[in-house]
Every structure is written in structure tokens, then in C-alpha cells.
Amino acid sequence: MTQRALIGSCLLAVALAGCGGGSSGSAPPPPPPVTGLSAADAARLLEQASFGPTPSEVTRVAALGLKGYLDEQIATAPTGYGGFSYVPHTAPASCKYDPTAPTGAASLCARDNYSLFQVQRQFYQNALAGPDQLRQRVAFALSQILVTSGVEIYEAYGMAAYQNLLLRDALGNYRQLIEDVTLSPVMGHYLDMAANDKANAALGTSPNENYAREVMQLFSIGVNQLNADGTLKLDANGAAIPTYDQDVIEGMASVFTGWTYPARPGAASVWTNPINFEGTMVSFPAHHDAGSKLLPNGITAPAGQTPEQDLKLALDTVFNHPNVGPFIGKQLIQHLVTSNPSPAYVARVAAVFADNGQGVRGDLAAVVRAILSDVEARGDTPSSAAAGHLREPALFITGVLRGLGAQSDGVFLVSQSASMGQPIFTPPTVFNYYPPSYQLPGTTTLAPEFFIHDAATALARANFLQALVYGGGAAPDPTVTGSSGTGLDLTPLTAAATDAHAMVDLVATRLLHGSLSTTAHATIETALGALDAADTLDQARAAAYLVASSPQYQVER
């Protein structure tokens, strides 16, 4: 049997061993709160709060303890995206990509300024090596809730500015975050609030409703009223109760009139300023609807208010809506810990959103601390058979690289995550790459990331591992300044493992905090036993490939 066929048959066996359901009967009660961290739980914490464990970080975090690690990370300043500067929305002729021409100054200018390539590359550099792992991870989750996209925002400096905003506010207060997002010219361009004019009866125009809808539907309160535990409130007939109607949408659309892009330095500010993604949008009262406006929860904005007054009242109204804690809290749990949090887990997090213990609402640092400290997140292994989530492509990539000690300049990784269905910062719509309510077909199990997991993207994951483990990664890109390529050195594995059993143990500890099932362990060990025992590098490659491509690694638990 060839090595490829051997590995293929082993993968099938591991899949069968790793995909079985939990035992029948009622689920055991949740474990008590954890005060310390074992090595396994420290690795689990790093899977949830960073872009993947490394052996040295597992040791360090186990010594720091849960509180010590979270305190450290919350206090760490953002790394940020740097090196970008303003470019006009329309690229000059000297900065355009021509697919029929050789690579040159024009095409590189277009790639580096009018695509997200350099921002995406920095994302992976920050994810792999940034000291602010928790902030980076939360900001990445927020970028998939408060969505903008390279589908519309193709200027690198613009997307870098928006991601820096999320990094800055990721562990601050949600009220400040929602205001900063609302006044971001990037969001203003993406969801049409920039240059949104008041109604004009003579022209038959009315305010654009796009941002008004999404700030409620996706960024704060959702479409239906929720209980504190995230379950639906129902009326006397058992039907869901909407949080707003078309009148509220129209009222909110009028709130968000009279704002446009900031002027460029030295230029006069006019209605409407040219597209500029640096700074904060500016108001023009003459283009703002000064009438009264219906807001959520039956609140009315009085007539005669300024754009700033209307905006403050509207954002205060949605921020103080009881839905926000369970609606946003549940999605953060899904991104960080598990796709299927219990209602009790959601309620505990929502309670912290409502009050951080010091009378402050919307404290994201406290919310994240509650998510990661909860009994449903901590412990060597999860207590529920439904716990965990499919590793989305970016986290799959970074988890493998950090766990195996690989290095990358991000170039290779940009195309790899795109082939797996997740082009970084370029979701296809405002609804992200996948909806948080997506269920595994034929079940009621929430599994958002499976929305983009199909035969093609599953094969792309395997091809990535093949290129990394057996192909050595990728050479430096001569068109990227300072490019170092992507590489993986498996020497530490070959030096530490004395036999096939020890090799599988070592890889499973690095990638799966030792949770590889006995059956899967034996299956992979058998595959390694069929290889040349003297070729320790081949043994290490096979172990790394088989563990990382196994269902037990694909689904983080």
C-alpha cells in the first residue's frame, strides 16, 4: 500500500472513531467552578482565548492561572494594523492590475492599496505572534458580528482602520463600540449611512434604511424579543414577538441622516465629502431629518434635535434594550467557546453584560471574562456531548501552526483560508460567512461554521496540511517586502518521540490537549507502524497530518 493510500485509509478509520455521539441518557450536571488550571485546561483556554496553544504558553498559562492570564491579556495594548495610508477611492492609472501584463509597479500598487491582501497578511502575523491574543481573538469575533467586507471596502487603509477600531474597543464598553462603529466611515460606506439624506418630497426620495435595519437586526437587539437566557419570548398564541416594525425602521433611518465622510486634511468640508475612510463621519444638520422619530421600545425622538442628539438617543435606546446582553453574549460564546451554549450559560453572561458587578452595563472585558470563566467553558474536557464548535478556517490554520511551532509571514495563509471558505475580512454579505443560527441538517444542533464546510472546503483543509507538513509550507514571496514564507520544522517532534506511540502522544498533546480518543490513537499509531521506523521525520509528518486532519481536531472541544 502506498503512503498516500495508507494515510487515506487511516483518515477514514479516524473519522469513524471520532464522530460517534455521546452516551444515551441524561447529561451529567455541570462541573463546579474551576479555581486553578491544569495543563489540559490551560490548553483549552488558549484555544478559546487565543489563536491556538503553544507548548510554552500552555506551561505559562497553567502557572498564571485563569484570573492571572485574563488580567494580563485584558491589560495588554492592541498590536494593531500599521503601514497603511489614504488612497483615493478610484485608483489612478499607474496603480491598476492588468492580468495580461507581467507583475510590475502598477499591479503591486493595486494589490497593496486596492485589495485587502496586506491587511489579511497582517491579520495572520498578529494572530500567530501578537502578544494581545485575547484582544485579537475578540476583535476577530466582533468583525463577524459588526460586519464590514472587502466586497465593498477594497481599500487596504480603510479596512485596516476598521479593524483597529474593533481592536481598540474589543474589551471596552459595548455602548462606545456601537457608537464608534456607527460613525465609522467604513461602516457608513458599507451600509449606506454616509451621505444618507433626509426625505425630499419633491424628488420622491426617503432616507436609506440599510444601516437602520442592520444596527438593530444584527448589531444589537435582533428581530425577536428574547428572554434573559436567549430563548424566544412568545405571545399568547405561541408566536415570536418582533422587537421592531417598519415604522421603527423608518424612524431609525431618519435618525441616521445628515452624516457624511470626513474631509481630507486641508479641504473644506461639504455635503457630500469625497470617500475618505480616515477619521469619523461628520454631520450636516441641513440634511438631517429634524422631525420626531419612532425608536425601539416605543420611545420617540422629539422633533428639533441635532444629528448628534438623535444619534445618541437612538444608540442609548438599542444599547439599553434587554435583548442586547443575550443576543450579543450568545454570539460571543459561539465564537469563543461553543456553538450550543445552554440557556443557563447565556443567562449568566447576559447578567454580566447588564451589570459587571459595579453597576456598569456593556463592559466587554467583564463579559469575555464571564464567558471564559464559566463552568461550561472550563475543565479538562467539556461536560456536554454537544459542546465545542468546528474550527473555522482561520482558527484551524493558526491552531495548527502555533501547535506545531510553524512560522509564517501570512502570504501563504491568505489564499489558504480563502480556499477553505473564509477570505479574511471579506464575508459575502453583512450576515458574515455563516449565520449564528445555522443547524446541522436534520438536527436542531447549532453549528454555524458548518455552513461553509463542504466537500471542496474539507479537501482544501487536507491540501493545506499536505502542503505544510509534507511540502514544507511556502517559499518567501519576492514581491512582498521582508517575506519569510511559511515553514514547519518537525525536528523537535523527531527528537522527543522515541517510538510511534510516543510520537502520537506528543502530537495529540500539542494539538488536542491529550484528548485524542483511544481508538483514534491506536489507528494513527498503526499507520505509523507501517512506515519505516528509522525515518523519524516521516513518522512525525504522518502523525502531524493525521491528528490535524482528524475530526477530533477539526471540532474543537
Image (cartoon, grey):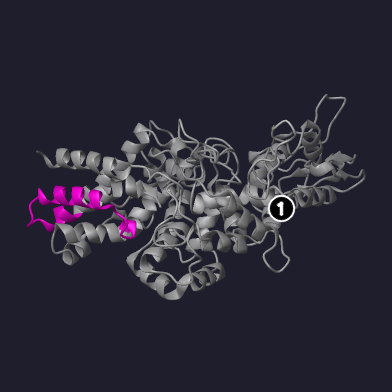
Report x, y in % for residue 321: 74, 49
Question: Residue visible at 71% across and 60% down?
Answer: 361
Report x, y in % for residue 453: 41, 37
What residue sits right under mark 1 in the picture?
Answer: 179
Q: Is residue 515 magenta?
A: yes
Side of 68 where 280 appears, left or right: right
Question: What secondary structure is marked by label 1?
Answer: helix
Foreground pick, 154 / 323? 323
Question: Residue visible at 59% across and 43% down?
Answer: 148
Foreground pick, 42 / 481? 42
Residue sitting at the far front: 25
Q: Is residue 472 visible?
A: no
User: For the magenta stretch, what is the residue range?
Assistant: 511-540
Side of 529 where 240 appears, left or right: right
Foreground pick, 186 / 329? 329
Q: Residues within 10 Å of mark 1 (few under 14, many from 20)?
A: some
Q: Is residue 471 magenta?
A: no
Image quadrant containing the N terminus = top left
Question: Residue visible at 77% across and 37% down?
Answer: 253
Question: Residue visible at 51% across and 50% down?
Answer: 335
Q: Is residue 497 visible?
A: yes
Side of 103 where 471 appears, left or right: left
Report x, y in % for residue 409: 37, 55
Q: Amino acid at mark 1?
A: Glu
